[in-house]
């Protein structure tokens, strides 16, 4: 048993840091781009006069960062070699490598190199590409994957509805077969909520019931709907705890798409939705862990240097003990995330759902909770300066608080773990588990 990171992964992290120091940090310092990261960050990123959407200058800066990372060979790391990446044809990349990379970047704090408020990073994560690669036709792959990588395609994910979130199998959006002008296709009616990136979207992945009954996983299909399709309307953008917003509520009224707009098997669309969920959750857990580590490290440093009443804050057990508990949880969670990621790499992807989903859920819900607790503790340790926006802790808390809901709510993740523990689901269904 060896817990050391592979030497080539350590070298990759060193090369990544060198690239960030060489190209991304100077870009962040240029033309007052620091306004997007210092105390002005929320104001500078948000176009308050345009519905709270991201400012063009902010998104242009993120795009330039991604272009530089792509040119240096980092951005497409997890993709197959045929798409400019460094991995096999699964497009999933190594879960261990991606987990370590995401923890490493998040532990560096706020910066242009890794701004997770926008799912932006110099090492990209491509769940939409994974979906199209595994379930799309060759025509769909050609249009959507290459278009995505060229910056010409942006896709939203339409599963959640105004009245249905975790209970996706009860969605009310419906699609009925119809022929228009001699073209066979489907007519979609319904609504979707939390369509991230809708303001720049060219296509929407819309999930709708095409057969079966409410509550059944079978009978839901995924449709590729071009943004400008008649009948698709943005009703509103939801203002959130951490602005700017790009989360839209959309309506679909008699939206017609041809039959080749179906992504994946007809009536089995939830398999498409599940295509990337475990990889995404283990990577999100790693990012939350990295941000928690940043908060703990900054708190230790501050408590050591700050000397009220003539002695370091760190000499007080009231300061020490909460940070000891957080540091202990970070160390234990790091081992669980990396062990789970390595186990995911060792088995076929289709077996992760049955064999490891409880471990992925443990990592995900605990990491997201830990990050918010670490950010809150950092605010407390830093006192007034921690409450102010000159420090990033309030931003970290506001951003990572969302993942206790959006990555599959904390309660849903815990229910999955409970299902394995008490024998309601999993490979040992019918028998309580033993740790």
Image (cartoon, rainbow, N blue to C red):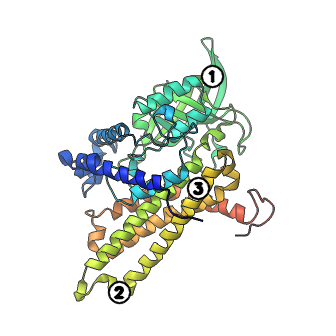
Query: Are there few (<14), some (14-19), or many (20+) residues within 10 Å of tag 3?
Result: some
Q: Helix or strand or loop: what does disc 3 sit on?
A: helix
Q: Marks 1 and 3, how far apart in space?
A: 39 Å
> Which of the two discs, 1 and 3, sits closer to the camera?
3
Q: From the image, which quarter does the N terminus lie in?
A: bottom right
Residue sitting at x 71%, y 62% = 420
Question: In the picture provided, is 30 more to the left or to the right than 88?
Answer: left
Residue 356, quarter of picture: bottom right
Outermost residue on the top side: it is 182
Q: Helix or strand or loop: what does disc 1 sit on?
A: helix
Residue sitting at x 23%, y 48% = 26
Q: Which residue occupies the foreground of this view, 345 or 41?
A: 345
In x, y percent, where is residue 127? 52, 42
In x, y percent, where is residue 42? 30, 53
Residue 342 is tagged as 3
Q: Which residue is mark 2?
A: 316
Q: Which residue is mark 1?
A: 259
Query: Are there few (<14), some (14-19), or many (20+) residues within 10 Å of tag 1?
Result: some
Q: Earlier in the sequence, mark 3 or mark 2?
A: 2
Query: Are there few (<14), some (14-19), or many (20+) residues within 10 Å of tag 2?
Result: few
Does residue 317 lie above or below 87 as drawn? Answer: below
Asked whether disc 3 touches disc 2, contact meaning CB atoms under 8 Å apart, the reply is no
Q: Earlier in the sequence, mark 1 or mark 3?
A: 1
Q: Earlier in the sequence, mark 2 or mark 1?
A: 1
Q: Which residue occupies the foreground of this view, 207 or 22?
A: 22
Q: Marks 3 and 2, how far apart in space?
A: 39 Å
Question: In the picture provided, is 66 more to the left or to the right than 9?
Answer: left
Question: In the picture provided, is 415 more to the left or to the right than 44?
Answer: right
Residue sitting at x 54%, y 51% = 95
Residue 270 is tagged as none
């Amino acid at each position: 048993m060896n817990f050391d990171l592979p030497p080539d992964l350590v070298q990759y992290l060193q090369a990544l840091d060198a690239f960030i120091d060489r190209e991304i940090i100077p870009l962040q310092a240029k033309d007052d781009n620091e306004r997007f990261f210092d105390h002005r960050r929320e104001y500078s990123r948000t176009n308050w006069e345009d519905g709270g959407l991201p400012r063009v200058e902010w998104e242009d800066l993120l795009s330039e960062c991604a272009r530089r990372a792509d040119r240096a060979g980092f951005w497409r790391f997890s993709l197959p070699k045929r798409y400019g990446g460094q991995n096999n044809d699964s497009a999933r990349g190594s879960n261990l490598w991606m987990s370590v990379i995401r923890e490493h970047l998040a532990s560096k704090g706020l910066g242009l190199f890794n701004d997770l408020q926008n799912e932006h990073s110099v090492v990209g994560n491509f769940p939409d590409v994974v979906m199209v690669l595994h379930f799309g036709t060759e025509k769909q792959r050609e249009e959507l994957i290459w278009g995505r990588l060229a910056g010409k395609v942006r896709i939203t994910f339409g599963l959640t509805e105004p009245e249905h979130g975790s209970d996706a199998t009860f969605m009310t959006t419906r699609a009925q077969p119809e022929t228009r002008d001699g073209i066979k296709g489907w007519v979609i009616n319904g609504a979707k909520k939390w369509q991230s990136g809708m303001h720049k979207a060219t296509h929407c992945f819309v999930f709708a019931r095409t057969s079966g009954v409410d509550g059944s996983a079978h009978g839901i299909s995924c449709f590729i709907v071009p943004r400008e399709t008649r009948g698709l309307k943005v009703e509103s953008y939801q203002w959130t705890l951490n602005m700017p917003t790009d989360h839209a509520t959309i309506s679909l009224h008699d939206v017609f798409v041809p039959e080749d707009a179906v992504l994946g098997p007809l009536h089995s669309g939830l398999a498409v939705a599940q295509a990337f969920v475990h990889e995404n959750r283990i990577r999100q857990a790693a990012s939350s862990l990295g941000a928690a580590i940043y908060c703990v490290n900054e708190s230790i440093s501050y408590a050591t240097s700050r000397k009220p009443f003539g002695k370091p804050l760190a000499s007080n057990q009231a300061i020490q003990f909460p940070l000891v508990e957080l540091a202990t949880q970070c160390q234990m969670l790091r081992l669980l995330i990396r062990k789970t990621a390595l186990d995911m790499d060792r088995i076929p992807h289709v077996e992760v759902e049955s064999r490891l989903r409880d471990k992925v859920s443990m990592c995900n819900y605990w990491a997201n909770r830990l990050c918010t607790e670490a950010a809150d503790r950092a605010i407390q340790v830093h006192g007034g300066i921690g409450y102010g926006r000159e420090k990033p802790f309030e931003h970290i808390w506001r951003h990572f608080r969302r993942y206790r809901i959006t990555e599959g709510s904390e309660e849903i993740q815990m229910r999955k773990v409970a299902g394995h523990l008490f024998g309601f689901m999993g490979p040992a269904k019918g028998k309580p588990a033993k740790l």
